[in-house]
Image: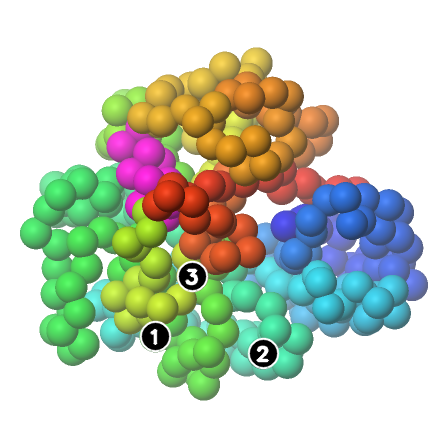
Amino acid sequence: MVGLGNEYLSRMKDPSKAQAWIKSNLQPYLPATKITSIFVGNEVLTFNDTSLTSNLLPAMQSVHTALVNLALDKQITVTTTHSLAVLQTSYPPSAGAFRSDLAPCLAPILSFQAKTGSPFLINAYPYFAYKANPKQVPLDFVLFQPNQGMVDPSSNLHYDNMLFAQIDAVYSALDSLGYGKLPVHISETGWPSKGDEDEAGANLENAKKYNGNLIKMAMSSSKKGTPSRPNSDLNIYVFALFNENMKPGPTSERNYGLFKPDGTPAYPLGFSLASAPNDAVSNSTGAGTPPRPPTSSTGYLSISSASSLVSYTNSTTTFCLLQLLLLS
């Protein structure tokens, strides 16, 4: 997946500029690099910026038109990422609903995505729910640890982790607008290994449990989808591959990475990349060696239960390391 930052939306409304950008930044790397999607803008609808919002769909349409003109639209889709804050209701999952004020913006975007076959991307962080209310949100429920879970009173479906509840809330919201068949992918999720005193739960042990358990679960042949979508593939990008040591804000913002900026592990995940097949790890400098962060890029770990990204050999699932590049 390749990202076009919010600062490029107004420029990308021009099809000629969109086509020039693709020809310069994507086409030279195909087919050696497998690029499946371009996400145009990040969490635009919750920025409360009318200019960004008005530019979003035209930019998405323009990028798609450029892909069509270059005969790349069959292999690369166009989408955008959303914060979980686009939901007005997320609990219980069956009652998931989008904010009413965003419906006029969402409807045409969803229509475009349904026609072009692109996934609905959501940035979901159970960590934020725990941080906001650590006394009421069970830690084991957000860390994929053994727990009694919760039962949706309407659907009677049982949830043993918050991330799946959040995903299904998004599916319910899409259902309510008539777009329940759109696939939901998690474009960001993760847990900080360090935080300030007022950032409850931001520590190395919880980060290790969250990301380690998430990856193991997604790699398990016995776990495919969520309670409401048991036959749907899980497509999840872990934020982030590397700690962003120069990022401003609270301490947690600089400590979401699985690796430190020098390429050494931030903490053990409970398994080694060296144990994965050689073709399971891309952008790598060697077996078991984490990939180095290229200039001006943000690292993500991509894990998927889809057969196109994951292969099963003797009940072992492989996964890919990808870089989510913000190209200018």
* Label 2 packing within 10 angstroms: few (<14), some (14-19), many (20+): some
**Of the image marks 2 and 1, the number of the one nearer the N terminus:** 2
State which quadrant residue 106 falls in: bottom right
Magenta-colored segment: predominant secondary structure: helix
Q: Residue 93 in magenta?
A: no
Q: Report which residue position mark 2 lands on.
A: 114
Badge nearest the viewer, 1 or 3: 3
- The structure residue drawn at horizontal position 31% and vertical position 22%, both measured from the top left corner, is 204
Name the spot of residue 172 as percent of width and height, x first: 34, 75
Left or right: 105 with respect to 199?
Answer: right
Q: Amino acid at mark 1?
A: Ser
Single out the residue that lies furthest toward the left: 148
Q: Secondary structure at mark 3?
A: loop
Report if residue 122 is visible in the image. Answer: no
Q: CB atoms at circles 2 and 1 under 8 Å apart?
A: no
Q: Which of the numbered marks, if any, corresponds to residue 172? A: 1
Q: Report which residue position mark 3 lands on.
A: 233
State which quadrant residue 233 falls in: bottom left
- The structure residue drawn at horizontal position 55% and vertical position 21%, both measured from the top left corner, is 287
- The structure residue drawn at horizontal position 61% and vertical position 73%, both measured from the top left corner, is 117
Q: Secondary structure at mark 1?
A: helix
Left or right: 233 with respect to 241?
Answer: left
* Label 3 packing within 10 angstroms: few (<14), some (14-19), many (20+): some
Magenta residues, as a range? 208-219
Report if residue 315 is visible in the image. Answer: yes
Q: Is residue 220 above or below residue 278?
A: below
